[in-house]
Amino acid sequence: MGLRELKKQQMRDRIGETAWRLFAERGFDRVTVVEVAREAQVSEATVFNYFPAKEDLFYSRFEAYGDRLVKAVRTRPADEPALAAFRRTLLEPAGLLARVEDGDAEAFARLRTVNRTIAESPALQLREQRAVADCVDALAAVLAAESDTPADDIAARVAADALFGVHRALIAHVRQHVLSDDSDGEPSRLATDVHRLAERGFALLEGGLRAYGAKGRDGAPTVA
C-alpha cells in the first residue's frame, strides 16, 4: 500500500471509529453525520467522500463479510459443491465471535453493543435486510451463470436464499443471545452454539426438505 492509500485508509478508519463510538454511546438514530464530522475533526463533505450514506458508517465492515461468502462460492474449486464452500467460509473463525470464543470479554461487550444498536434502529434493520438481499442476488447470479441458466432462474434463487437463510438464522440467534438478560453466563460457549446450529441448518439443506415437518408415528413433526 502506497503512502497516499495508507493515509486514505487511516482517515477512513478514524472516521469509522469515531462514528462507532458515538453510536455506541447514544444510539445510531440520535447521532448526526455533522456530529461525527465534528468529533473526527473533518468536514461533513469528507465523511460523505468515504461513506456515501450514514448507514455506511455502521455497516461497511459487515457488508464486506457477505461479499466474502459470495466470493467463496464463486472462486471455489471445480469439484466443491456451492453449499460446501459457503459452509466452510461461514464456519471459519473470524471477527468478534472468534474473539468471544477465546474468552475476550471486550469483544463480547462490543458484540452486544453492535446488536443493541441495530435492534434499537429501524434504519439499521432496514439496511441489514437490504444488504442481505443484495448478497442473495449476487449469489443467485453466480449460481445461475455456473449452470448456464437465466439470471432469474428459480433454482439458483432458491439455493441462494436457502444458503443465506442459514446465515440470517445465525445472526438472529446471536442477537437474541447477547441481548438476553442471562447472556453473561459463559459467553465463550456462544461460538460453539453457533457452530452447532449452523451444522444443523446445513444438514437440513443437504438432506432436502422432502421429509422435514412430516409427522412421525408419535404425531410430532420430524426435524433434522
Image (cartoon, rainbow, N blue to C red):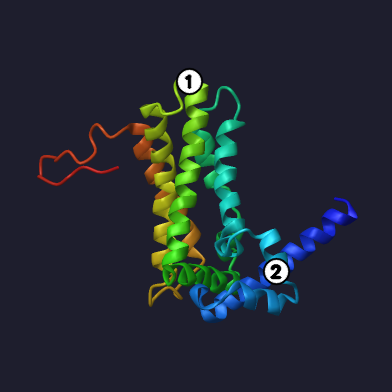
- Local crowd size for mark 2, using a 10 Å CA cut-off: few (<14), some (14–19), many (≥20): many
The answer, for residue 83, to whether it is visible in the render is no
For disc 2, the marked residue is: 15
Up/down of 188 relative to 198, above or below: below
Quadrant holding the C terminus: top left
Q: Quadrant of residue 17?
A: bottom right
The answer, for residue 84, to whether it is visible in the render is yes
Front residue (pair 43, 102)? 43
Q: Residue at x 73, y 65 (%)?
A: 46
Residue 44: x, y in percent?
Answer: 68, 70
Q: Nearer the viewer, mark 1 or mark 2?
A: 2
Up/down of 73 relative to 30, above or below: above
The amino acid type, in three-letter code, at marker 1 is Ser
Residue 100 is left or right of residue 132, and the answer is: right
Front residue (pair 123, 68)? 123
Q: CA distance from mark 1 to mark 2?
A: 43 Å
For disc 1, the marked residue is: 147
Q: In the orientation shown, which residue stands out farthest toward the right?
A: 3
Q: Residue at x 47, y 63 (%)?
A: 124
Q: Residue at x 48, y 20 (%)?
A: 147
- Local crowd size for mark 1, using a 10 Å CA cut-off: few (<14), some (14–19), many (≥20): few
Residue 169: x, y in percent?
Answer: 39, 52
What SS does tag 2 mark? helix
The amino acid type, in three-letter code, at marker 2 is Ile
Q: Earlier in the sequence, mark 1 or mark 2?
A: 2
